[in-house]
Amino acid sequence: MAHVLIVDDSPTEVHVLKTMLEKNGYQASFATDGEDGVAKAHSEKPDVILMDIVMPGLNGFQATRQLSKDPDTASIPVIIVSTKDQETDKMWGLRQGAKEYITKPVTEKELVSKIKTVLGG
């Protein structure tokens, strides 16, 4: 069972994503901001990280960049999940080290598909 870390400051969004993941057989944990997300990535070593962009403190772009540059967490694929739907946002997210980019609202089918893609399935 793959472990997915959700990094999002919206309790509603965390609940929606967690429900979709658990329904599809994934184990889910969450962090409420970028700093917490980076810390949990180090301590929990999840298989995949779902990263929001707009958060207080360390934003999703900054957290993704930190994770992708750290040898300890660089192998963990990050999927950005954000309301920011501009092509420039997507390109910037991928340049920070994200493997995929999903625009909210997320569909269960797209979420599971992207997770399988980054896990090599």
Image (spheres, rainbow, N blue to C red):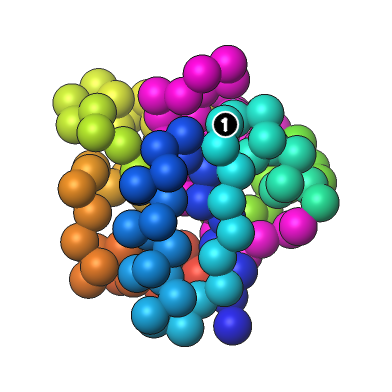
104 part of magenta stretch: no
- From the viewer's perspective, is residue 51 above or below residue 53? below
Name the residue rendered at 22%, 71% in the picture: 109
**Where's residue 112, x and y in %?**
34, 70
**Where's residue 82, x and y in %?**
31, 37
Please name the residue that numbered disc 1 is placed on. Answer: 33
- Can residue 5 be spotted in the picture? yes
- From the viewer's perspective, is residue 57 above or below residue 74? above
- Going by the image, does 23 lie left or right of 76? left
Residue reaching furthest to the top: 57
**Where's residue 53, x and y in %?**
41, 29
* On-image quarter of the N terminus: bottom right
Instruction: Residue 3: name its quadrant.
Output: bottom right
- Going by the image, does 96 lie left or right of 83? right
Name the residue rendered at 47%, 39% in the picture: 8
In this rendered view, identify the residue nearer to me: 37 or 19: 19
Classify mark 1: helix, strand or loop.
loop
Name the residue rendered at 31%, 63% in the picture: 111
**Where's residue 9, x and y in %?**
47, 34
Q: Report the span colored magenta.
A: 44-69
55 part of magenta stretch: yes
Name the residue rendered at 78%, 47% in the picture: 42
The amino acid marked with disc number 1 is Asp
Callout 1 environment at 10 Å: few (<14), some (14 to 19), or many (20+)? many
In this rendered view, identify the residue nearer to me: 112 or 90: 112
- From the viewer's perspective, is residue 20 above or below residue 10? below
In this rendered view, identify the residue nearer to me: 16 or 93: 16
- From the viewer's perspective, is residue 62 above or below residue 82? above
- Can residue 121 be spotted in the picture? no
Count of labels in the image: 1
- Going by the image, does 53 lie left or right of 47? left
